[in-house]
Structures are given as structure tokens and as C-alpha cells.
């Protein structure tokens, strides 16, 4: 079987192309963030104040990578870490005003690129793709 015929490679190819185009547009718009920061921002836009361990699970990053990315984001004024009153061993992560404001700039860019990527694909076909990818993720989580 050729590499181009393997589903995993097709997923990698689409992801790489989409990421490349989205982040090129971010950079063209004067916003220099990386993929890990983008994922964290999106999670916090949806659920601000997540406990760091929950953020770790929801972003699927390693502990070390998450810690480095959060440190960088804090230095850039995008997030604040606050002591978790319920558990002193973990911090809650909150967006700053600057981090919140990026949503109105970044999400439209990403959504436009995603719309371009799915051009010519019916709503029903997209539902099937979502369902299949969710099932694949569940299968892989179970080992």
C-alpha cells in the first residue's frame, strides 16, 4: 500500500495544509502564535478558568509542553494563572483581556479557511466525517 493511500497520512496531509494556511493568515494579520497556543486559546474561549490538569487533558498536550506554552502565553499577556481554591496543587488558567480579544481576530480567519477546505462537501458528508473521526478517536483512547 502506498503512503498516499493510508488514511492516517491523508489525515496528516489535510491537517498540515490547514494548519499551514491558517497560521500563515494569522501571521499576515500580525498575530504570531503557534498551534499549541491556538488550541489552548480555543479551549479557554469556550471554558475560561479551567484547572491546569483539565486543560492538559482537553488539549492533549504533554505536561512539559503545556507548562512551557502556558509560561510563554503568560509572558505575552494572554493568560493568568491563579491558585485553585479547591486544590492548592493545581492552578486555574484564565484569559486576560488581550487573550479574550484575540477570539474576534483569529476565529474568523480559521473558520474561513475551514469553510474553504470543506467547499464542495455536503452537510451530510461532513456529519459522516465527524462521526467517523470521533469513533476513531474513541477506538484509539481505548487502546
Image (cartoon, rainbow, N blue to C red):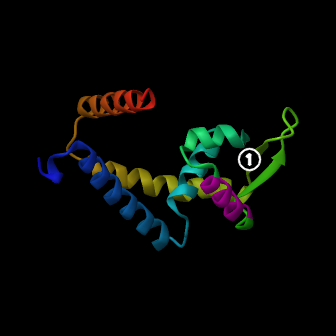
Residue 90 vertical placement versus 68 (above, below): above
Report if residue 39 is visible in the image: yes
- Report which residue position mark 1 lands on: 93
- Check if residue 35 falls in the magenta segment: no
Instruction: Name the residue rendered at 77%, 54% in the picture.
Output: 80
140 or 59: nearer the viewer: 140
Quick check: 77 above or below 83? Answer: below
Q: Is residue 127 left or right of residue 40?
A: left
Which of the image's four quarters has the C terminus?
A: top left
Residue 78 in which image quadrant: bottom right
Q: Position of residue 32 (x, y in %)?
A: 55, 70
Q: Residue at x 36, y 55 (%)?
A: 113
Query: Left or right of 28: which side holds 13?
Result: left
Residue closer to the observer: 87 or 32 = 87
Q: Which residues are magenta?
A: 64-74
- Counting from the top left corner in percent of width and height, residue 117 is at 29, 51
Residue 133 position, x and y percent, is 34, 34
How many other residues sit within 10 Å of disc 1, few (<14), some (14-19) or many (≥20)? many
- At 70% across and 67% down in the image, what residue appears? 76
Q: Is residue 69 magenta?
A: yes
Which picture quadrant has residue 23?
bottom left
Amino acid at each position: 500500500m502506498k503512503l498516499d493511500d493510508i488514511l492516517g497520512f491523508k489525515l496528516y496531509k489535510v491537517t498540515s495544509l490547514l494548519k499551514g494556511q491558517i497560521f500563515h493568515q494569522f501571521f499576515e494579520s500580525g498575530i504570531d502564535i503557534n498551534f499549541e497556543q491556538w488550541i489552548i486559546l480555543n479551549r479557554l474561549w469556550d471554558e475560561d478558568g479551567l484547572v491546569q490538569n483539565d486543560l492538559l487533558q482537553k488539549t492533549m498536550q504533554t505536561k512539559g509542553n503545556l507548562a512551557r506554552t502556558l509560561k510563554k502565553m503568560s509572558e505575552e499577556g494572554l493568560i493568568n494563572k491563579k491558585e485553585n481554591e479547591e486544590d492548592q496543587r493545581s492552578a486555574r488558567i484564565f484569559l486576560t483581556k488581550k487573550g479574550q480579544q484575540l477570539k474576534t481576530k483569529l476565529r474568523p480567519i480559521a473558520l474561513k479557511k475551514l469553510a474553504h477546505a470543506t467547499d464542495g462537501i455536503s452537510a451530510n458528508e461532513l456529519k459522516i466525517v465527524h462521526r467517523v473521526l470521533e469513533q476513531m478517536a474513541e477506538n484509539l483512547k481505548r487502546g
